[in-house]
Image (cartoon, rainbow, N blue to C red):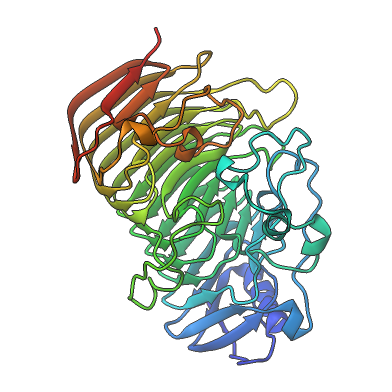
Amino acid sequence: MTVWDVSAGENTVCTTVIQAAIDAAAVSGGTVRFPAGRYLSFSLNLKSGVTLHLEKGAVLVAADPAKHGGQYDLPEDNPSDLYQDFGHSHWRNSLIWAEDAAHIAITGEGMIDGEGLTREGPGSQWKTQAGEFPLSMRGLPAEVMAELAPEVSAMQGLGNKAIALKNCRQVTLKDFTIRNGGHFALLATGVDDMTIKGLTVDTNRDGLDIDACRRVTIRNCRVNTPNDDAIVLKSSFALGEARACEDISVEGCTVSGYDLGTLLDGTFGRTQERSPDQDRVTGRIKIGTESNGGFKRIRIRDCRFERSRGLALETVDGGWIEDVLCENLTLTEITTAPIFLRVGARLRGPEGTVVGGIRNVTIRNLTATDILPDYCALIMGLPESPIHNVTLENVSLTYRGGMSPEDVAPFVDDLPTAYPEPSMFGITPAWGLWARHVQGLRIEGLTLKTEAADTRDERLFFAVG
């Protein structure tokens, strides 16, 4: 297989040279190799049969339109952009993008630096607007909200993803580092047969987003995302259909919410206390929130959560989460509920979308310590869609404690249309576990502790059926 070497440009934009190498490699398949050096670029279209190999010391840098006299590829038209935000709905406005490509790879010990990318993007164009933003953001002034969710017109020419893949097959992402990857360090939508191994990601918003994909393995990755989710599975309507995320395995990964950049420099900073949604720092593994197509056969094994939110399984847009196994998980310094299962009825989807659900979930051999006391473990269904068949086996949760019944927020209702976060219900009446609208909850080997006295109830069960 032929190898094309790219020459470093330092402060010279190399987009044309790099794209020419990709186009040449695509003729019969080959590798575009980046030796040690700095490569400044706008959008690159990765094509079938091509591997980008970043050697140690190579840094592919996202150019800044304001500084470097160019722009990213414009966001393509998407007639199905109503039901998810701008970032999920477009792929070409990225540093590296591929569409309908097969047998593609990005490898090597080098780095992708999203220096010139923006982390912001407009919300969805869905007119109902229920559940668009977490309830924790209700007090933010209009000018702050406008900065977090700008108008679509403001995005023209900007790049907001490091890597975006749409309808691709046989994809390998291995060993490289992403720093400050924009809205998504990786957005993979409708991708089949993908292996992600050994990545290090220290980024300013989402880490690895796997949307409506099939047969994906994420193994031995380190993802630090204080401002958003680290590894997250989604099933949006971005492809114009409700397509499930199926047969996904997340193994041996560590996620965290340390200060931005401090995973890479090894200082693991703890200065930042809150994410832009005004809850504590993020950095978790999550299923949802976009959930039109549902999730099937998901395995999350041998993973660590450090200074992050807890494990979250959420469906609010009509899909079903089913056949999920989460095992051998270690959580430390947890900034919200250690476990959060939620069925909601935001129903951001085409007319006729109905409430989905959660069934057949096993969480076993999970240990969480130093947990924020505000929110206990939550398993929260709806009256019309209780959560079915959840097993908690050998689960140990140790909270900081120190709260009392006087701190508890009054329970108003099930908040079906609200954006799902543990804080949506306020400080919980239980400090250990609260299950509401559940059928078939099996608990074996549950240990609940507090480091300081907490006079709220240990467990509250409001099960139906």
Q: Which residue is painted at 37% across and 50% down in the image? A: 335
Q: Which residue is painted at 33% across and 76% down in the image? A: 266
Q: Residue furthest top?
A: 465
Q: Which residue is painted at 66% across and 64% down in the image? A: 160
Could you say which is closer to the camera, residue 283 or residue 416?
416
The quadrant holding residue 48 is bottom right
Residue 106 location (% of width, % of height): 51, 68
Horizontal arrangement in the rendering, residue 455 relative to residue 66 (left or right):
left
Q: Residue furthest front?
A: 406
> Which part of the image, by quadrant, shows the C terminus?
top left
Residue 174 location (% of width, % of height): 43, 65
Q: Is residue 321 above or below residue 311?
A: above
Horizontal arrangement in the rendering, residue 337 relative to residue 110 (left or right):
left
Residue 212 visible, this angle: no
The quadrant holding residue 270 is bottom left
Count of residue discs: 0
Residue 388 location (% of width, % of height): 40, 18
Residue 170 location (% of width, % of height): 52, 53
Q: Which residue is painted at 64% across and 52% down in the image? A: 140
Q: Is residue 389 above or below residue 294?
A: above
Q: Is residue 325 above or below residue 385?
A: below
Horizontal arrangement in the rendering, residue 24 relative to residue 31 (left or right):
right
Residue 277 visible, this angle: yes
